[in-house]
Amino acid sequence: MMISILLVFAVSTAYCRDYGREMRATRMSVVDFWKNETKGDGLNVRVAHGVNSWPDLVDQLHAIKINFRSNEVVRPVLQDLYASQADPTSPVLQYPVILHANVFRSPRSVETEVDPSTFVEKAKDLFPDATLSLGWTKQSNFSHLHPKFKKLSWRQLFHILEYISRLDQPVMLSVRLSVAAHSKEQLLWLLGMDQSISLLLWSDAEDHVTNWTPIVELRRSTTKNRILYDLDPKHRKFLQTDSNEPIATPPTFSLQDWQAVEFSSSGSQLSTVVRSEKGPAFLGEPTALLLSKIPPPNFPSEQKISGKVHFLPKKGMENVDLDENSGVSIYLMDKVQDIDSPKIKNSLEVFIGFDGKIKITNGQLKNLPYYETKSVGQLPDSDCYGFEVTDMGWRVKLDAWTAECGNQKLRKRRTVSIELDTPFQKNRHLRNVVVSKKGDSAVDFLLEELQHKNAYNYRNPWITVVSTILLMIYLL
C-alpha cells in the first residue's frame, strides 16, 4: 500500500491522556487542539517526517497525519480507522487525526493525484471525526515554472469549494509557500468561510520567495493561529525574525446580516452560495438566495445595496455562447415569506450581467399603466463591475461601473446610471433585499464588499415635502 504516516507535534509538550471516545466525537480540528501550544502563532508547530514506527509514534503522539498516495488504499485504511474507533483503549485515536491526499493535479506533476470525490466521500462516511487535508501533486523543476502556475486563481478556488463546502468536519489545505505568496486574497477568503478551514504552508529548497509581504500579512492576520507551517529552515528562520504582531483584517461582508436560503438542484454539480467574511460566492445553477436581515426603513429614508461582482466563466466556457441572462440579480420585495423557489417572479429586479448589460425591471404591474416596465443600460466588457443600488421607495436607481479585478489594472473607469419609477408600498415600508444568481451554471461569480445600508434621506427638504404629499395622494 502506498501510504505514509507523519507525526505532527507542537513545540511545547501537551498531554491529553484523559480524553477518550468523547473527545473523538467532537470533530476537533488540529488547529483548535493546539490552540494553547501554538500561543496564537502556527509557526510554533513542527512537523517530523517519516515516523513510521508505532512505538515512537505512540510515545511522542500529539496528532498523526496519514498520507494517502493512491486510490486503492483509501477504502481499506479508512475501514481500519473506522473499526479502531470502537476500541476505547486505542492510544492513537485519543488525539486529532489528519487524513491527507494530493487530490489536485499540479503543472509538471510527477505523481498521479488521488481522486478527490472518492477521498472526500469515503472519509466523510467512514471517519468523520478527522481533519481532511487536501493538497497538490508533487512537481518537477518547480523553480522553472511560469509565474502564472505559481498562484491559486479564483477559478481554482471555486473548484476546491466543490469538495469542501458541504463538509461538516474540519478541512486543511496544504499549500506551497511560493504559491501562497501570490494567493493572499484567495487564502484569506478561504480562512473567512463560515466553517473550520485551516492552512498548512510548506516549502523546500526550490521555493524562492522574492516578496515576503503577503506571507507576513497572512501570518499576522487575525486568523494566523489557523495557519501551520512545514518550512525549509531558511524560510522558517526568516519568519521567526520578522514581526508577528497581529494586524486587523476587517471583514468586508457581514455573515450575520445575510441569511443563505438553498433549494435542491437536479444536477450533479455543486450549486449553492458559499459565504465568507470576504464576500459570498455563487456557484453552479441558480438555486440559492441571500436574504438581507436588515429591516427595510420607512419613507422618506432610503436604502443602498453596494458591492463589486467578479464574474468567472467555468473553464472551457470563455469562448462559448453563454446565456445572456447570466449575472447577479438584486430583488426588492414586499414579502420574503412568499419565496418558495429560487425563481423569483412579480418583483422589482436590478440586474447586472456578465456581459455588462444592466437593467431595472418592475414586476407585474396591475392597474398601474403609467409606470414604465424597465430601464436598461450597457457597460463596456469587463470581468468585474462595481455597483450601488439606491431604493427611495418611489424610485430605484442603479449606478454601475467597470472595476479592477485583482492585479489587473483598469485603463479607465466607465460608469453608467439608470433609474426607474416604481410603485410604492401602502405601508410606507421600503422593500426587503434578496440577492441571487441568474442564468445558467456556466458563469460563477464572487461578490466582494456586499453591503446593505439604511440611511435617512438628507436631500433638499422641499423635495422630501413634495414626495410626502405625493405619497399621501397615492395612499388616498
Image (cartoon, rainbow, N blue to C red):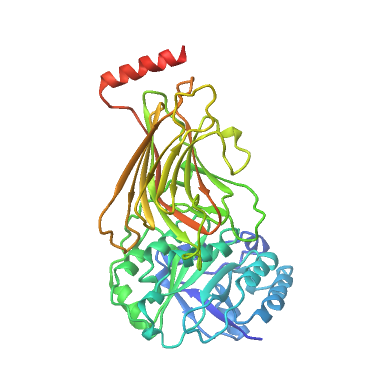
- Picture quadrant of residue 37: bottom left
Q: Position of residue 405 (x, y in %)?
A: 35, 59
Q: Nearer the viewer, residue 13 or 186?
A: 186
Q: Position of residue 463 (x, y in %)?
A: 29, 21
Q: Is 204 displayed left or right of 101 in the figure?
A: left
Taking the spot 60% from the left edge, 82% from the top edge, the residue there is: 69
- Farthest top residue? 476
Instruction: Kindly tell me whether residue 376 is visible in this rendering.
Output: yes
Does 391 sit above or below residue 411? Answer: above
* Residue sitting at x 59%, y 85%: 52
Along the line of sight, the residue nearer the viewer: 413 or 237: 413
What number of labels is visible? Answer: 0
Point 36% across, 45% down: residue: 387
The answer to whether residue 29 shows anywhere in this view is no
Q: Quadrant of the N terminus?
A: bottom right
Residue 301 versus residue 253 in the image, above or below? above
In the image, residue 463 above or below residue 95 = above
Q: Is residue 265 above or below residue 72?
A: above
Residue 114: x and y, percent?
60, 77
Q: Quadrant of residue 38?
A: bottom left
Give the side of residue 289 with respect to residue 147, left or right.
right
Say which of 225 and 442 sits in front.
Answer: 442
Q: Position of residue 195 (x, y in %)?
A: 53, 56
Query: Residue 180 or 374: which is nearer the viewer?
Result: 374
